[in-house]
Image: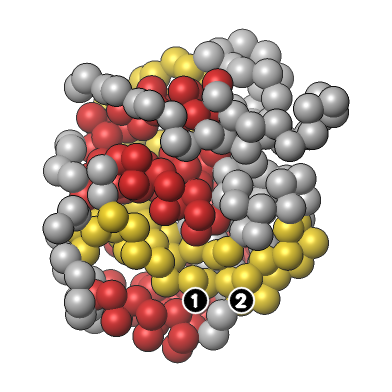
């Protein structure tokens, strides 16, 4: 069987982000996605209107059913929605229900790209800090990185998160500037080991962060080294955004949906 990535993520009815983005991105990476649904959101491609989180015991039962059945080679978490769900996942790692050497990509979702709360930020940040030591890679946007680290400088923030136990941090600068290329930096154990420069494309994209983190998790499940997984993911996400769907083609401010079913070829 293909390697399995167990994802903890919420349902986005528009299909742009959340668990559908995870399934599509992981499939494109060559792996199989299994989902523990953490929340049902009320949103479209442009805006979040609300959500109802799944109870922590329900999420745990979904996850353990998968762990007992499938060859889980990597874990990815996106929207967890409540401190109870974050604590539950932390406990799963602490109890070694998830093997200690299983790669874990943590996308610490606080606010959707389209706006709207996905949980109380202050309490989520506090809970996430307990989960950080189990993360192989954390992929925050700039707002999330600053909230988690308490630092305005992104590089100092990444180093601080590594000092708190996270193995690696992917620093993404896409939210900090309106023009110019997007720079991304991979920090491992507090040292910057890889820098990539991506073209800044016109428009805003719904689900790009979910897609990138999930594709990386898929490549880790396939056996890639972390730097290689990030490098391939950079190429893949750029191509999905270039081919993005436009739900509102006459509105230049409307968010686009990444086309994750591109014919992607990569060479490491």
Residue 250 falls left or right of residue 233: right
Residue indicated by mark 1:
85
Q: Residue at x 35, y 26 (%)?
A: 264
C-beta proximity under 8 Å, tags 1 and 2: yes
Q: Is residue 102 left or right of residue 186?
A: left
**Residue shown at the point (58%, 44%) measured from the top left:** 207
Which corner quadrant of the image does residue 73 belong to?
Answer: bottom left
Rendered view: 193 above or below 31: above
In the depicted view, which residue is nearer to us: 67 or 84?
A: 67
Q: Quadrant of residue 100?
A: bottom left
Tag 1 secondary structure: helix
Screen quadrant of the C terminus: top left
Q: Looking at the image, which residue is at 26% across and 49% down?
A: 31
Relative height, residue 238 to residue 31 (above, below): above
The residue labelled by disc 2 is 53
State which mark lies toward you, 1 or 2.
2
Q: How many marks?
A: 2
In this picture the colour scheme is secondary structure
Sequence-earlier tag: 1 or 2: 2
Element class at badge 2: strand
197 in relation to 14, above or below: above
Mark carried by residue 42: none
Percent of width and height locating residue 104: 30, 56
Front-lying residue, 117 or 217: 217
Q: Position of residue 155 (x, y in %)?
A: 46, 31
Q: Is residue 185 visible?
A: no
């Amino acid at each position: 069987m293909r390697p399995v990535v167990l994802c903890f993520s919420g349902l986005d009815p528009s299909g742009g982000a959340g668990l559908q983005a995870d399934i599509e991105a992981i499939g494109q990476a060559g792996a199989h996605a299994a989902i523990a649904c953490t929340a049902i959101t009320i949103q479209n491609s442009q805006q979040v209107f609300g959500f109802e989180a799944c109870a922590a015991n329900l999420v745990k039962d979904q996850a353990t059913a998968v762990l007992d059945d499938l060859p889980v080679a990597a874990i990815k978490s996106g929207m967890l929605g409540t401190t109870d769900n974050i604590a539950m996942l932390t406990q799963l790692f602490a109890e070694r229900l998830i093997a200690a050497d299983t790669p874990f990509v943590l996308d610490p979702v606080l606010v959707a790209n389209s706006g709207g709360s996905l949980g109380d930020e202050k309490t989520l940040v506090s809970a996430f800090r307990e989960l950080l030591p189990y993360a192989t890679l954390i992929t925050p946007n700039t707002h999330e990185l600053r909230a988690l680290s308490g630092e305005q400088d992104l590089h100092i923030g990444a180093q601080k998160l590594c000092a708190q136990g996270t193995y690696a941090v992917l620093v993404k600068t896409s939210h900090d500037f309106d023009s110019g290329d997007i720079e991304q930096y991979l920090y491992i154990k507090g040292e910057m080991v890889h820098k990539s420069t991506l073209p800044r494309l016109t428009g805003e994209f719904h689900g790009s962060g979910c897609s990138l983190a999930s594709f990386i998790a898929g490549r880790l499940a396939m056996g890639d080294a972390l730097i290689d997984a990030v490098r391939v993911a950079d190429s893949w996400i750029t191509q999905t955004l270039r081919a993005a769907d436009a739900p509102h083609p006459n509105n230049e401010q409307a968010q686009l949906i990444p086309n994750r079913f591109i014919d992607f070829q990569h060479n490491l």
